[in-house]
Image (cartoon, helix red, strand yellow):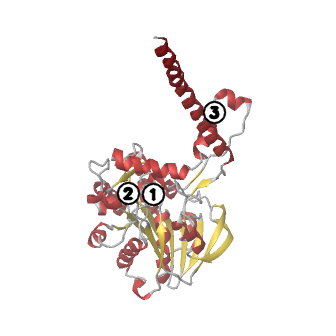
């Protein structure tokens, strides 16, 4: 009996030591990870997510007591965690393999590697009415001089690639109504749906990005030329350059683990552009000049920003054709506009994100013969700057 008791004591001690050993191991791992995070290089931006990362918040008594500092510090810790890119990739892989998620970061995960912008915005109707009214007013003020090109979403051309029961609005019905109102106001409308259906086997949209491809832009430009009796730029006779390994905005939102990168195509043209610093309404100072495509940006993640050097408030481009045109646009137009150099002698480019004034003063002081309003559907129904089309000129 005593022998059995004697043998039981070491067993009890061994069993009791396990929780302590596990707790010690957990503490070691926790403090090791904290130490790694402390000395891990801090970043200001994430190329993978295509966004700026949080910086260490300044500690003040007011921010501490209000809880703002704690919230900001938590965000900073999440953004600066060691191995963040790998963790995001792992999360995406688990979501796809185990949870079979059809949506990530507001992006719908379609078939065959397609990604689509989710079209469900409770404020879309209000934004659309406001922007469409501004467009119609602009067309009415410049009768016979305004062309409206609204690029449809990739989902309109490739609906079969959408995930099942995707929460999408009826874009075709919305486009019918938008175009009808624009025509009634006197705008010439470029409706791409028929042409895109005919050429749907071509590379019209990026799978990992919300933009159309250069080929998609050229097909839109081809339709614009047909409407205006212009001879299109011949891409078959031009030098073509391809930039591989393009991961766009949809990829940045989803970090889809098995994504196929896209390819950006561009055509080197001798034409120059001048980007202006905006001082006021129709008041500019030349900032810098250069080629239509900034090749240095192809080395960054946001390769699409190479076209026109990104979204500038006001730009002028020297063309090889005749007459002049003012293009009022979102970023879809950036790879479209270089083709216009074959048809116009001067091209003005306005992006309301950098030009908070109406376009009428530019039409007047710039002496533009016509205007092209070029947006994609997703931007037009949500953009807060397109209302600048309705701003009357203040220049007398």
Q: Which residue is drawn at 59% across and 40% down?
A: 75
| Residue at disc 1, secondary structure | helix
Nearer to us in this view, 237 or 355: 237
| Residue 62 falls left or right of residue 184 | right
CA gap between label 2 and label 1 equals 8 Å
Q: Residue 115 carries which label?
A: 2
Toward the bottom, the furthest residue is 237
Q: Position of residue 2 (x, y in %)?
A: 49, 11
Q: Residue at x 41, y 53 (%)?
A: 381
Q: Which residue is identified by label 1?
A: 251
Nearer to us in this view, 272 or 373: 272
- The answer to whether 309 is drawn above or below residue 171 in the figure is below
Toward the top, the furthest residue is 1
Mark positioned earlier in the residue sequence (2 or 1):
2
| Residue at disc 3, secondary structure | helix
Q: Which residue is identified by label 3?
A: 70
- The answer to whether 383 is drawn above or below residue 31 in the figure is below
Q: Residue at x 63, y 70 (%)?
A: 275
Mark positioned earlier in the residue sequence (3 or 1):
3
Q: Where is residue 85 in the image (x, y as percent from the top left)?
A: 53, 52
Pointers 2 and 1 in contact (C-beta within 8 Å): yes
| Residue 183 falls left or right of residue 316 | left
Q: Position of residue 344 (x, y in %)?
A: 50, 81
Q: Residue at x 53, y 63 (%)?
A: 302
CA gap between label 3 and label 1 equals 30 Å
Pointers 3 and 1 in contact (C-beta within 8 Å): no
């Amino acid at each position: 009996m005593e022998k059995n008791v004697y043998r039981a004591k070491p067993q009890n001690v061994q069993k009791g030591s396990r929780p302590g050993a596990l707790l010690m191991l957990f503490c070691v791992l926790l403090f090791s990870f904290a130490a790694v995070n402390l000395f891990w290089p801090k970043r200001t931006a994430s190329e993978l997510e295509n966004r700026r990362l949080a910086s260490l918040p300044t500690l003040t008594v007011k921010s501490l007591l209000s809880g703002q500092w704690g919230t900001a510090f938590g965000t900073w810790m999440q953004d600066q965690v060691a191995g963040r890119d790998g963790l995001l990739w792992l999360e995406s892989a688990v979501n796809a393999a185990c949870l079979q998620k059809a949506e990530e970061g507001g992006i719908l995960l379609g078939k065959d590697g397609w990604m689509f912008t989710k079209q469900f915005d409770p404020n879309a109707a209000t934004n659309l009415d406001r922007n469409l009214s501004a467009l119609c007013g602009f067309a009415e003020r410049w009768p016979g001089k305004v062309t409206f090109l609204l690029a449809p979403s990739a989902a309109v051309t490739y609906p079969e690639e959408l995930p099942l029961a995707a929460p999408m609005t009826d874009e075709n019905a919305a486009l019918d109504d938008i175009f009808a109102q624009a025509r009634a106001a006197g705008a010439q409308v470029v409706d791409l749906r028929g042409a895109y259906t005919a050429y749907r086997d071509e590379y019209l949209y990026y799978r990992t990005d919300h933009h159309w491809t250069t080929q998609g832009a050229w097909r839109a430009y081809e339709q614009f030329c047909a409407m205006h009796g212009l001879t299109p730029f011949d891409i078959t006779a031009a030098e073509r350059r391809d930039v591989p390994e393009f991961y766009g905005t949809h990829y940045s939102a989803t970090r889809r683990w098995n994504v196929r990168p896209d390819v950006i195509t561009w055509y080197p043209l001798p034409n120059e552009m001048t980007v202006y610093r905006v001082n006021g309404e129709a008041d500019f100072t030349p900032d810098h000049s250069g080629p239509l495509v900034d090749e240095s940006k192809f080395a960054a993640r946001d390769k699409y920003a190479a076209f026109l050097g990104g979204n500038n408030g006001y730009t002028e481009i020297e063309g090889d054709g005749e007459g002049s045109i003012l293009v009022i646009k979102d970023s879809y137009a950036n790879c479209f506009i270089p083709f216009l150099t074959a048809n116009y002698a001067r091209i003005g480019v306005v992006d309301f994100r950098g030009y908070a004034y109406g376009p009428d003063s530019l039409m007047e002081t710039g002496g533009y013969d016509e205007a092209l309003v070029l947006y994609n559907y997703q931007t037009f129904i949500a953009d807060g700057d397109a209302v600048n089309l309705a701003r009357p000129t203040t220049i007398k």
